[in-house]
Image (cartoon, helix red, strand yellow):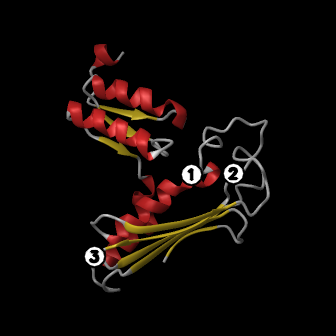
């Protein structure tokens, strides 16, 4: 199909375990690739996929769909207008009851991410990270620290709580994920 249609862009929408072979196949056939999150199970796997993209001179990127949600766009306008000044700290929090049942913790329901090293948190870490980096601006994160826990006690959850921080220049990024905090929310502070 790739050889016959020669697409300019391929959007990979499959479960994470199949991303690498599909991404590399599309890249090798000359397409740029937009891949759903999490793009890879590890940084090593991502580095290998990026090496293929570099070799064939194509773009590989992960879908960052929350950047286009109305509240994020509104916050961008507020920052662009200078209404709140310079960003020196960003705190991104997701509190979602993923251990209350469903695909992340039910061994009888196939989950495309439950097997990943970070479990359910791994699936949401992409959103937390790119949102924080977006608001902190350009630069390479340094001083990364993270505390991963399983507070629910559910053995199928792997991890259900994360508190991480990093710096970009002098600015601080804080990432929080909790399956046990209530009320459920997605917040940018």
- Report, in whole angstroms, how far the alpha carbon at label 2 lies from the one at label 1: 10 Å
Give the left or right position of residue 123, taking residue 55 as reference.
right
Q: Earlier in the sequence, mark 1 or mark 3?
A: 3
Would you name the residue on which mark 1 appears?
122
Q: Of helix, strand and loop, which one carries label 1?
A: helix
- Crowding at dot 1, Cα within 10 Å, few <14 / some 14-19 / many 20+, comes out as many
Q: Position of residue 73 (x, y in %)?
A: 38, 66
The residue identified by callout 2 is 158
In the foreground, 91 or 168: 168
Please rate how many residues cluster around mark 3, counting C-alpha atoms within 10 Å: few if below 14, some from 14 to 19, many from 20.
few
Residue drawn 29% across the image and 18% down it: 5
- Mark 2 and mark 1 residues within 8 Å of each other at the beta carbon: yes
Give the SS element for disc 3.
Answer: helix
Q: Where is residue 137 in the image (x, y as percent from the top left)?
A: 30, 69
The residue identified by callout 3 is 80
Q: What element carries label 2?
A: loop
Q: Give the side of residue 175 with respect to residue 178, left or right.
A: left
Q: Residue at x 41, y 47 (%)?
A: 63
């Amino acid at each position: 199909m790739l050889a016959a249609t020669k697409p300019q862009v391929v959007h990979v929408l499959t479960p994470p375990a199949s991303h690498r072979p599909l991404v590399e196949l599309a890249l090798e056939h000359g397409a740029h690739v937009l891949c759903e999150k999490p793009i890879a199970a590890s940084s090593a796997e991502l580095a290998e996929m990026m090496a293929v993209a570099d070799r064939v001179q194509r773009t590989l990127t992960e879908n960052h769909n929350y950047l286009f949600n109305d509240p994020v766009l509104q916050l961008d306008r507020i920052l662009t207008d200078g209404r709140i000044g310079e960003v020196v700290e960003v705190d991104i929090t997701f509190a979602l009851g993923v251990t209350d049942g469903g695909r992340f913790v039910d061994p009888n329901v196939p989950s495309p991410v439950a097997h990943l090293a970070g479990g359910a948190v791994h699936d949401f870490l992409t959103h937390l990270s790119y949102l924080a980096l977006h608001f902190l601006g350009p630069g390479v994160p340094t001083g990364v620290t993270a505390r991963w826990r399983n507070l629910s006690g559910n053995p199928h959850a792997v991890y259900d709580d994360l508190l991480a921080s990093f710096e970009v220049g002098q600015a601080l990024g804080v990432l929080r994920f909790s399956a046990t905090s209530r009320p459920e929310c997605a917040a940018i502070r």
